[in-house]
């Protein structure tokens, strides 16, 4: 009954329900001096299993959700793919995509824009999903121009069922939007 409805993310708690998706946070560490700069670089790194497989569009949906919400908040945003041997930019919002599964078959290949750039990251973690669902696990870090990380956490985005307007990537997009909301607080 929930599939196909378009709903807003409920903020302020560890979990947010967006009709056919669920976003959960854990291990959140926010320093009192955390402030997101006006110019934001989203630095995307994939775990080995994610970079070796078709992610079903989840990676692109996470980045799209995060980028859209940051732009709505008036931030200038650029997206940079992690590359072996290249130092990451500072400041940055680093997304380490630990795992992703399934996704919308129509979006297959959308994540290849990112995946095809030779991304690397931390070891992959597993996501379990039922038929008709998809999921993504992301470690998030806000790295200032100098000093230690000011924000870190792990977010999961899960889609259950299927939404007619966003397919099985709704949970990944909701995770990206939730990342933006937490970073902007």
Image (cartoon, rainbow, N blue to C red):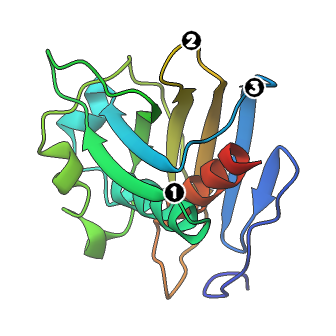
**Cα gap from disc 2 to disc 3, whole angstroms:** 11 Å
**Cα gap from disc 1 to disc 3, whole angstroms:** 21 Å
Q: Indicate which disc, 1 or 3, sits on the residue closer to the N terminus.
A: 3
Q: Is residue 177 above or below residue 182?
A: below
Residue under the image location 37 percent in, 69 percent down: 104
SS at mark 3 in the image: loop
| Location of residue 19 (image quadrant) | bottom right
Give the number of the disc on residue 85: none
Regarding residue 133, the answer to whether it shows in the image is no
Q: Which residue is mark 1?
A: 66
**Cα gap from disc 2 to disc 1, whole angstroms:** 24 Å
Give the number of the disc on residue 33: 3
SS at mark 1 in the image: helix
Q: Indicate which disc, 2 or 1, sits on the residue closer to the N terminus.
A: 1
Task: Please tell me whether mark 2 or mark 1 is closer to you in this view.
Answer: 2
Give the left or right position of residue 8, taking residue 72 as reference: right
Picture coordinates of residue 178 (x, y %)? 66, 54
Residue under the image location 33 percent in, 32 percent down: 45
Q: Is residue 74 above or below residue 63?
A: below
Q: Which residue is mark 2?
A: 147
Task: Please tell me whether mark 1 or mark 3 is closer to you in this view.
Answer: 3
Q: Nearer the viewer, residue 70 or 51?
A: 70
């Amino acid at each position: 009954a929930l599939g196909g409805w378009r709903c807003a993310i409920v903020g302020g708690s560890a979990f947010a329900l967006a009709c056919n998706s669920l976003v959960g946070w854990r291990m959140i560490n926010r320093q009192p001096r955390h402030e997101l700069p006006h110019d934001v670089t989203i630095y995307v790194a994939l775990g080995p299993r994610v970079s070796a497989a078709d992610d079903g569009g989840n990676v692109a949906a996470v980045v799209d959700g995060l980028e859209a919400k940051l732009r709505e908040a008036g931030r200038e945003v650029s997206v940079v793919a992690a590359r072996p041997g290249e130092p990451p930019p500072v400041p940055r919002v680093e997304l380490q995509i630990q795992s992703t599964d399934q996704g919308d078959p129509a979006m297959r290949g959308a994540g290849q824009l990112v995946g095809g750039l030779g991304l690397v990251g931390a070891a992959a973690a597993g996501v379990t999903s039922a038929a008709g669902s998809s999921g993504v696990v992301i470690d998030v870090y806000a790295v200032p121009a100098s000093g230690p990380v000011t924000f870190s956490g792990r977010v999961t985005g899960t889609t259950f069922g299927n939404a007619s307007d966003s397919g099985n990537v709704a949970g990944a997009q909701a995770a990206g939007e939730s990342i933006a909301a937490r970073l902007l607080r």
